[in-house]
Image (tube, grey):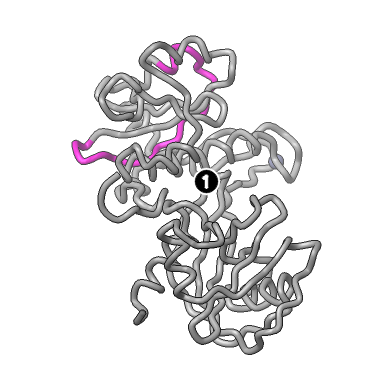
Amino acid sequence: MTGRPAMGFIDAPANRAAGLRGDKDWLERQLADPESKMIVFVGDRPSISVSTPSLAIDFREPQAVLNLNREVDCVLLHIDDNGRAVFATQLDGRFHDQIVGDDVKLIDLRSLAMQAVLPPADLGALAQARSLLSWHQFHSFCSNCGKKTVCADAGYRRDCPVCERQHFPRVDPVVIMLIQHDDKFLMGRGHNFEENHFSALAGFLEPGETIEAATRRETFEETGIRVGDVSYLVSQPWPFPSTLMIGVIGQALTTNITADPEEIAEARWFSFSEIRQMLANNHPGGTSLPPPMSIAYQMLQSYVSNQPT
Ligand SMILES: [Zn+2]
């Protein structure tokens, strides 16, 4: 890969055609149009064409996919630059052999992002599709009355035909924070991390909590560090299945770490010069960071590269 590494999943095409989603006739015409495109997932892995020099999404005609199974839910992702509707759907494992072949493979979305082998907009569209399709897969029954729900609004709602409750796709916010003290950042090593692998602290927002409060609470729970000012930096959809990573920087009011062994294996302060070595993958102690497609890497890179050495 050349040039500066990029954050994954952030470039989904912007024209999501929200105003057309409720127009059933328009949707039917798009699904019948052989120029429209369908992204196919089998289980949670997208179908990828491997025949060209670089990998590409294996776009199919919507009707060719629906001919395999007319029961599937189709979600509208966007209108592409040529005015074509782009849909996505999910088939179960029974259809594996009808999708996969010598030129087509199912490839895990995380590894596609790690390898940065797809155009950023395609990776963004796959993230949008995976989150939406996962929500449909696990919300086929009404949480109010238990009856089967039906896909509505081009995939952005499910309706219960019995109690008439409407259900909407979820996005789960997570704060991920650079906690700063002078020229150091606080980072932690999760129990599931490899030895010597550190990342920014992170945690789910709880109901009734601001981003700032969640940042302070999570940092204190995991490390005993008190945080004052909190500022927003950047965000990243994380489609496993529907997280939104909200990147912030917080100013530490204290420095003595008391790591909670239930939450993390270890927490440490890292100087900016150490972080530069970790970003360049040449830290003398072998300490490593998450990959360049991650928000943690990009926040550290962006912040530290703007600091005097
Ligand atoms: Zn219901």
Residue extending farthest to the front is 284
Which span of residues is magenta-colored?
A: 65-83
Nearer-the-camera pick, 80 or 259 = 259
Residue 83: name its quadrant. top left
Nearer-the-camera pick, 105 or 150 = 105
Residue occupying the point 38% across, 14% down: 64
Left or right placement of residue 132 versus residue 298 in this view? right
| Image quadrant occupied by the C terminus | bottom left
Residue 264: name its quadrant. bottom right
Does mark 1's beta carbon lie closer than 8 Å to ligand 1?
no
Q: Mark 1 points at which residue?
A: 239
Question: Disc 1 marks which amino acid?
Answer: Pro
Whether the magenta-drawn stretch holds residue 77 is answered as yes
| Image quadrant occupied by the N terminus | top left
Residue occupying the point 65% across, 38% down: 139
Whether the magenta-drawn stretch holds residue 297 is answered as no
Q: How would you rate the neighbour count of disc 1 (Cα within 10 Å): few for under 14, some for 14-19, many for 20 or more? A: many
Q: In the image, residue 207 lies at what x, y percent?
A: 68, 67
